Amino acid sequence: MKYSAINLKEKFAKFSEHFSPKIIARMNDYHFKLGKFQGCFVWHKHTDTDEAFLVLEGEMMIVFRDGKVILKTGEMFVVPKGTEHKPFAEKECKIMLVEPAGTKNTGETNGDMTAEDNVWI
Amino acid sequence: MKYSAINLKEKFAKFSEHFSPKIIARMNDYHFKLGKFQGCFVWHKHTDTDEAFLVLEGEMMIVFRDGKVILKTGEMFVVPKGTEHKPFAEKECKIMLVEPAGTKNTGETNGDMTAEDNVWI
């Protein structure tokens, strides 16, 4: 079929790793990614870009050096470029990220949690 | 509060017009918009940009000159730049759009359905 819907539930069923977002769509130079978050992620920032989070199921927190935001199902937040942040989810949380193609999950902080940044599902 | 979640349900409660997307967030040069679609929109295209649709509640169709795609709750589609399309929804459908700031809802087709393109809610 020339035009096919992208079904988020079907895409989520294709992976189980935490903190390793997968690409499901491209819009110009941006990627839409799905992620499953659980536990503590690392402190990091993206110097050159904002990063949008939309919670599709569950609840997560984004901790900043001077505050935090709690995101429940159906809530979103855009982390401003250059802002250090640390995502956290007590239970598994399903999210959509929108950010420029090539954005690394750990930003400028390389480490064990740095995921492959170009995996489509 | 310095960091506040954007609650989509609360934002949807703030407007009722159809085919007149409202801005809820900015990420770099892009806007996240919420729209309520019902009925037939006009044929149009966006020459310079792709346009992302995510259905949050309900069902819509995007008709193309050579096909169509049906989007149900939890499904998305990116209309490629330059592609003529005509959104349609039999019943009211709630969607999120992601596109560059300043993108007009009717693209290059001005008319009665052209909405103000810079309304935040």
Image (tube, coloured by chain):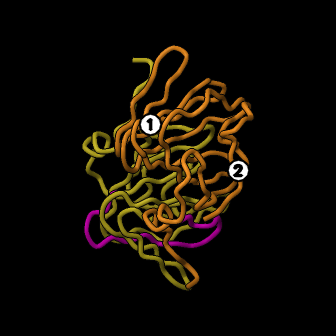
Chain colours: A orange, B yellow
Residue extending farthest to the top is A66
Residue B121 in view:
no
Give the residues in magenta.
B77-94
* Residue on which the image places disc 2: A117
Q: Percent x, y for residue A76?
A: 43, 40
- Amino acid type indicated by mark 1: Ala
Q: Chain of mark 1?
A: A
Circle 1: is it few (<14), some (14-19), or many (20+) Cα within 10 Å? many
Q: Residue at x 72, y 35 (%)?
A: A111
Left or right: B56 in relation to A78: left
Q: Is A95 or A101 nearer to us in this picture? A: A95
Q: Earlier along the polypeptide chain: callout 1 or callout 2?
A: 1
Q: Residue at x 61, y 58 (%)?
A: A23
* Residue on which the image places disc 1: A89
Give the structural element (helix, strand or loop) at label 1: strand
Left or right: A86 in relation to A77: right
Q: Percent x, y for residue B114?
A: 44, 56
Q: Residue at x 67, y 56 (%)?
A: A28
Point out the image quarter for the N terminus of chain A. bottom right
Classified by dominant secondary structure, the portion drawn in magenta counts as strand
Give the structural element (helix, strand or loop) at label 2: loop
Q: Residue at x 58, y 82 (%)?
A: A2
Point out the image quarter for the C terminus of chain A. bottom right
